[in-house]
Image (tube, rainbow, N blue to C red):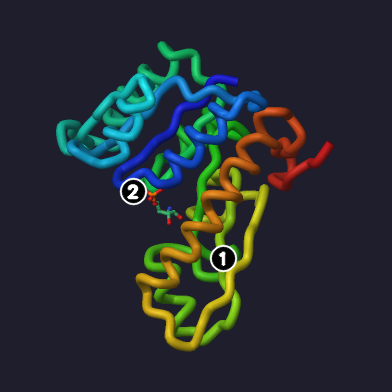
Amino acid sequence: KKVAILISGSGTNLQALIEHTRSGLSRAEIVLVISNKENVEGITRAEKAHINTKVIPHGNYPTREAFESTVTRELRSARVDLICLAGFLRVLTGSFVCEWRGRLINVHPSLLPMFKGVRAQRQALQAGVTVSGCTVHFVAEEVDSGAIIAQEAVAVLPDDTEDSLTQRIKTAEHKAYPRALEMVARGEVVLGEDGRCVRT
Ligand code: GRF
């Protein structure tokens, strides 16, 4: 399957996905990396791996729809089958999500459905939970609410800061995301009509 990764920043998940898909046994091939921000580390990582990149600064477009139609054009011309959001900091419109239904996945730094939205790690610290983690899920129109493909738990330690917890969760993401992508690329998990995962 041809995969596009959408990023806005450092791209450590992108790096984990690159390494996984290059390992030899993967059914997924990353053919395109799109960033909505210029000069981000993720783009450098993709270039080093000789993957095609496109920077599409959202500020250059008058509307969300205009931005997304450029993104869609790039995805189509690269014949992309699946999209992975990896630290992509733009909310996608319902029509984009609908068009890519079942072929669009995201990673979120909490055990969903807990701590949706921004700064999930800080929300976890404030709630006083002793376990958190990450979730890879199909993207649904409502943010952070799509069907769960894979999760990985991490401990929340008494002296954790937002940074230290973020790092520990990222390490878990770097395992869970490649595993989830592989399951989707192999058709072992599909998004059912009812919005829940069907595992074959
Ligand atoms: C990850 O923590 C992910 O859960 C969130 O954004 C972060 C991206 O990090 N959606 P990176 O750019 O992959 O390093």
Q: Quick check: 161 left or right of 114?
A: left
Residue at figure coordinates x 52%, y 28% from the top left: 99
Q: Which residue lies furthest to the right in this view?
A: 200
| Nearer to us in this view, 167 or 194 | 167
Q: In this rendering, does residue 90 appear at all? A: no
Q: In this view, does 48 lie to the left or right of 146?
A: left
Foreground tag (2 vs 1): 1
Give 125 or 73, whichever is nearer the viewer: 125
Q: Does the residue labelled 2 lie within 8 Å of ligand 1?
A: yes
Q: What is the x, y in percent for residue 87? A: 39, 48
Of the numbered discs in the image, which one, if any, rests on residue 89? 2
Res. 149 visible in picture = yes
Q: Residue 133 carries which label?
A: 1
Residue type highlighted by circle 1: Gly
Where residue 41 sits in the image (x, y, percent)?
A: 26, 41
The tag earlier along the polypeptide, 2 or 1, is 2
Q: In which quarter of the image is residue 167?
A: bottom left
**Residue 61 in the image: above or below residue 116:** above
Q: Tag 1's secondary structure?
A: strand
Residue 15 in the image, given as x and y percentages of width and height? 43, 39
- Where is residue 36? Give x, y as percent: 27, 37
The quarter of the picture where residue 132 lies is bottom right
| Residue 7 found in image quarter | top left
Q: Are marks 2 and 1 in contact (CB under 8 Å)?
A: no
Circle 2: residue type: Leu
* CB of mark 1 near ligand 1 (< 8 Å): no
Q: Which residue is painted at 32% across and 39% down in the image?
A: 42
